[in-house]
Amino acid sequence: MSTTIIRNGRVIDPANKRDEIADLYIADRKIAGSKSGAREKFTRRGGKSDVEEIDAKGLIVAPGLIDMHVHLREPGFSHKETIESGARAAAAGGFTTIVCMPNTSPAADDPSTIAWIKDRAAQVACVNVLPAGAISKGLAGEELAPIGSLAKAGVVAITDDGHCIQNHEVMRRAVEYARMVDLPVLDHCQDYNLVGNGVVHEGYWSTLLGSPGWPAAGEEAIVMRNILLAELCDHPIHCQHLTTAGSVRLLREARRRGVKISGEVCPHHIALTDEAIQNFDTNYKMNPPLRSQTDVDALLEGIADGTLAILCSDHAPHAEFEKEVEFDVAPFGIIGLETELGLFIDRLVHKHAKIDIVRLIEMCTIEPARLLKLDAGTLSPGVRGDVTLIDPALKWTVSVDQFQSVSRNSPFNGWKLKGRAVRTIVAGKTVWKL
Amino acid sequence: MKQAKQKRSGAAVPIMDAEAIRGALRRIAHEIVERNPELIHVVLAGIPSRGVEIAQRVAAFIHEIEKVNVETGVIDVAMHRDDVGTRSELPIVRESKLPLPLEERTVIVVDDVLYTGRTVRAAMDAINSFGRPARIQLAVLIDRGHRELPIRPDYVGKNLPTSGSEKVRVQLEQTDRGPDEVRLEKQ
Amino acid sequence: MTTRWTRKDLLGLRELSADEINFILETADAFKQVGTREIKKVPSLRGKTLVNFFVEPSTRTRTSFELAALRLSADVINISATTSSLTKGETLKDTARNLEALHADILVLRHGSAGAPQFLANRLKASVINAGDGAHEHPTQALLDLYTIREKRGQIAGLRVAIIGDILFSRVARSNIFGLLKLGARVTLVGPSTLVPREFEKLGVEVSYKIDEVLPKADVVNLLRIQHERQRREYFPGISEYIRFFGLTKERAKLLKADCLIMHPGPINRGVEIDSEVADGLHSVILDQVTNGLAVRMAILYLCGGIST
């Protein structure tokens, strides 16, 4: 039985309301009881006794972080990323659990594809990979996917991410059905008619450059739809990668009334604005797009007051030759797992001081765990030994060439950030360290 | 663009003052009148920038002498240079003006300094695109030698032997807004 | 004397200074004169290869660039989207790289995607000239428009210029806005509100939906071609309604000041954005624009193509 002792770190475990300097023990792949203050000799029972001691002085010891919005691209697009490489990228970013999106090829709209993903992850992934299933067949937005069977196959949520069901009636039935099997519904909020062939935020910069605009109303219209349906069906709907001031306002008002609606934010939507697109660099092209400073300010407020409770990356790898094309034609998306935590700590905690590190950790642990009903995101005794060690003061420079991800489509190369995961432990085993 | 430091004064030798320049241009005017009995066919075509002022001043002298208004023009050579694309800086192009047709004309190319001859070759190229004059002649204020092409002047203000490391500086009242003078600078 | 020009590419007017724009116009003066010579040819780009790469088709602009290049003694090749390997799935970058391997010195690109010329300019040693990229910029058109105004009115500062039509999707409008504002003109945009959103005011121009109020004050009227193809059906109801509200009919032309200039980038839709008689009338400088286009393009090719790399 192997044992890991993490000594002298600041243990932050929001689920158990802990924030104290203490030692943390992991035994037999699970969190064991931990003692604060005095050191105690831990009794070893039977068998081999290999004890790993990790000095966490000056570091934060947090439950393994969860990223519920990641594209692993397998099956079908392994030139962009694989389950194996994506998992390594997650580990390098400090994440021990990731939820992968279903817009693969074939789409994850069938139990056999889910089984393949889970199988593959069990063989090669160094972190926990939880699949999300599709809402509609082929993500086409017309017929329901076999949601019940997907639940049985082990998906943690359903989403058509990458696409959005336009027919509100179809979405309504999907939400009602998901309620039956108690699956959370996640939605990429995009009204295809309002958005058209928009590639950048509709505003000053799209007007100046003559690029087709993606208006904020295109996201807000669907957020509003989801609020109505969450109420109508009495079932949680989670709005993915929100970007606009209007979305935040709608969410705030609805949550105040007790509607089961939630939202998440990606780091690029608070670290960049639409001004960044003026050189037509495709590393700034993503869906939904970068927005104006007003929207960024509203997102920061939404994070500060708890309206937006979950953080994630929307890690979207693309091969270099796919992104090295004209802006209009390039695929949407950037990678994000390996810069996510650094950006969030640097911007939310240090630069804008909107939340403290404890709340940040909550937004990456108990918040997603609660939404998806996961047995993760805590350091309670008996749970799987997933731990992330964080140095909130570590200054580092992003170097894309050293990433674990197969792809390199990131706009953050060269950025100087303060705050980083320094060690990632899954089931007691260190899967990555700085 | 940084330039190498040059030794100031002491290294600049005056060659011609305003009086000398005036005298030279008047003499050139006389020579042109002598060699061209039908002044009405003559065009004094100056190469920008200083050639243009010299052409106008020579035309003024001819008017003094013969009471005839000789036509003047401008030949931009920048477009016709044979070294476009090989120099790190591009020469500025200007509008050319020549009275047409050129068929019976004597075009006298006018410039301040004749050196390698390449500028004059470009000027002849430019003239050819306007038409085919009866003859082309060349008038220069200074001939400093070192020809690289078989070109010779018809009218010279002053012959000035120089070495490759020296620079001939011409200053004219209108073009340079300073007193007329010619200086030789060692580098 | 040497140049104040240091750019190997011309991608748009937004990044040029007023100084640079004026320098181009002055250089164009010199090249306009070449068109009046008996031998309309100068050797400035002799031995250089220019490729007209028109992914989006155009006859007028392409012909203008071709003629400009020939007058500068360059060798010219014309490639269109259909004749190029783009149809076989080759990326734009690879197609351009292949052209560079053939020692193309200057690439004139017209493309449907905003930013395509910049994309190539960043990756190629050749000079890239933007002949129109999506709705973004069409710098040589705006430059010839500025040249024409300057030729007829002396200077641009202080003039009131009205640009009329489908502004939202117009690269000609954008380049003109950038150039005119830099040179000190006052710009008013006119057209249906769906095609001239108020957001444009943030660029420093006025927006009006009442053409009859704008025309009497204008020194220059620049008309854009209006089309009612499928993509625009949501933006305005039809040609006859457009004419009623925004067409430069001969009645409306009576509102113009005596010395007002009427311009149009072409090709003209007679009877739509402009009445046939007005297009041929006294105010119109549309044909001057074409002649000036040649001079301006010669200037650009000389400046960008003449720099040694």
Image: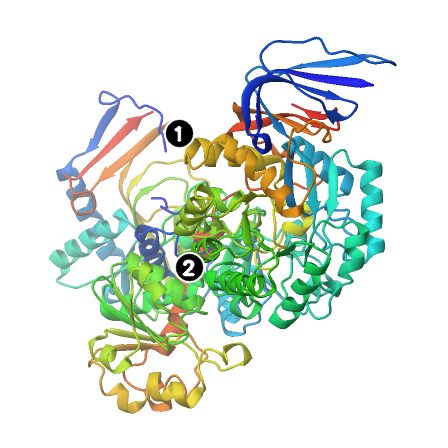
Looking at the rendered structure, the kind of residue marked 1 is: Gly
- Residue C260 placed where, x, y %? 24, 77
Q: Specify whether residue B130 is in view.
A: no
Residue at 20% x, 52% y is B58
Find disc 1 in the rendering and name its residue.
Answer: B164
Find disc 2 in the rendering and name its residue.
Answer: A203
Count of marks, rendered view? 2
**CB-based contact (under 8 Å), mark 1 and mark 2:** no
Horizontal arrangement in the rendering, residue A424 relative to residue C37 (left or right):
right
Horizontal arrangement in the rendering, residue C298 relative to residue C148 (left or right):
right
Depth check: give the residue in front, A52 or B55.
Answer: A52
Distance, label 1 to label 2, CA atoms, is: 62 Å
Residue B62 picture quarter: bottom left
How many residues crowd mark 2 within 10 Å: few (<14), some (14–19), many (20+)?
some
Q: Is residue C263 above or below residue B80?
A: below
Q: Is residue C178 above or below residue C38?
A: above
Residue C210, disc: none
- Residue B25 placed where, x, y %? 20, 46
Q: Is label 1 in a helix, a strand or a loop? A: loop
Q: Specify whether residue A199 is in view.
A: yes
Q: Chain of mark 1?
A: B
Q: What quarter of the picture does the C terminus of chain A occupy?
A: top right
